[in-house]
Amino acid sequence: MNFLLKSICCVFSLLLVSCHYSYEGNEEEGVVGSEIEYKLAPSILGKEIVEAQVDFVSPPFRANNEFNVWYEISIVNSFKDSLTLNSIDVVNAVDGAELIKSFDENYLRRNYIHLGRQSASGNLVIGPGQKGVVALRMTFSEALEIPNIVFHRLRFGAVSRDGAIVELTFEVALIEIPAPNSISLGLPFRKGKWFYTAESHKDTRLISQGSPSYAQRYAIDWAYLEDDGVFVKGDLEDNKSYPAYGQEILAVADGVVKEIKDGFPDNIPGQINIKITRETICGNYLVLDIGGGVNAVYAHFIPDSFKVEVGEKIEKGQLIGYLGNSGNSDGPHLHFHLETKSSVALGGEGIPYHFEKFRQLKSFSYEDLATMFGGDKLDLSDSVNEIRLNEWPIRNGVVEFE
């Protein structure tokens, strides 16, 4: 949620840390029961030493002209010795155990996260009792290519009694892939050009009342650009210098206002003026119940700018407040995502959504963010201008809504 202003060198970028529909799922969707008949191969050791599970699988969604399937697999080493994760295969459990996707060592080094300890990037050694998570990302050209049921084949390296390295293979985590996303939203703001970034939120794991979840799996940070790409005019430490500041924020669907948090001051751009905790991270925020077990979460409003009240029924496109710079934010922007209902904000599972139509003007990687902005504007002269229909804006870039 952090929008980073590098005022000294006049570079402006987003630093992402840690927003007609129908969703009939719940927080247990993706957890497979006994109705799946495929039987995983037994451990070659005669006993199970690796725990692996997928807690939640969100619906596949369209982005960049492809269908995307995103979820996380957690792995626990319950063996007395260390294991080295070598690869993960995703295998179709219905169609003759067809290999769907193989995630090799290079992918795992970039995407394996050790939980509860600091470790060097790329370390795939899992010690006894240690746990880690891998975010698995798969793409398919057509919806019909998406398998219904899959399992995971994990390969580990282990040291034998004579000191030799041996490979151990386990079949684990049998899961069901739900039907593709059916949620199509209205805009959370007015039409125009918007810079966005959706890279780092997807791996933000939060624990709520003892249960982990990825509420921000499909969160996007948004900042308004003027037509010529200008994102700041005047004093870099004045929120009002940014065209994004004060933009009208709208209801993305009909719904009921479930929660509002207000009273946090705007930060000075380039700074965060409050201690960031679970209670302050969103700053001034609003949670909208849009039905079907899904909440829309909006964060970083201007204080005292809400135009609706808790319990109020509101309509799609209705003004709800104004874009600010409160909470874990050091530049004016809107944080927006959908999540399953939970008792606390950021306590649900992230749910994908589509926008009916937008123009993709620019796309770039997370690593490119620090060099994309210079001076007071973003160069839009090389825009690709690709029309996207019923998609989610993936990665980072600039889109135009008309």
Image (spheres, rainbow, N blue to C red):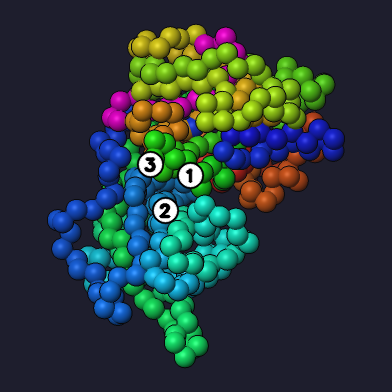
Residue at the (43%, 62%) spot, across then down: 129
* Residue range of the region highlighted in magenta in the rendering: 290-306
Sequence-earlier tag: 2 or 1: 2
Residue at the (52%, 57%) spot, across then down: 114
Quarter that holds the N terminus: top right
Q: Amino acid at mark 1?
A: Arg
Give the structural element (helix, strand or loop) at label 1.
loop
The front one of 238 and 140 is: 238
Q: From the viewer's perspective, is the residue at label 2 or at label 1 nearer? A: 1
User: How far from the left and from the top, in percent, is residue 162?
Assistant: 47, 91
Label annotation for residue 211: 3
Label annotation for residue 151: none
- For disc 2, the neighbor class at 10 Å (few under 14, some 14 to 19, many from 20) is some
Q: Is residue 174 above or below residue 272?
A: below
The answer to whether any part of residue 228 appears in the image is: no
Classify residue 53 by image quadrant: bottom left
Give the structural element (helix, strand or loop) at label 2.
strand
The answer to whether any part of residue 81 appears in the image is: yes
Residue 79 in the figure: left or right of residue 124: left
- For disc 1, the neighbor class at 10 Å (few under 14, some 14 to 19, many from 20) is some
Residue 109 in the figure: left or right of residue 89: right
Q: According to the image, label 1 marks what residue?
A: 205
Check if mark 2's residue and mark 1's residue have beta carbons within 8 Å: yes
Q: Is residue 156 above or below residue 51?
A: below
Q: Is residue 197 magenta?
A: no
Quarter that holds the C terminus: top right
Give the structural element (helix, strand or loop) at label 3.
strand
- For disc 3, the neighbor class at 10 Å (few under 14, some 14 to 19, many from 20) is few
Q: Amino acid at mark 2?
A: Glu
Label annotation for residue 72: 2
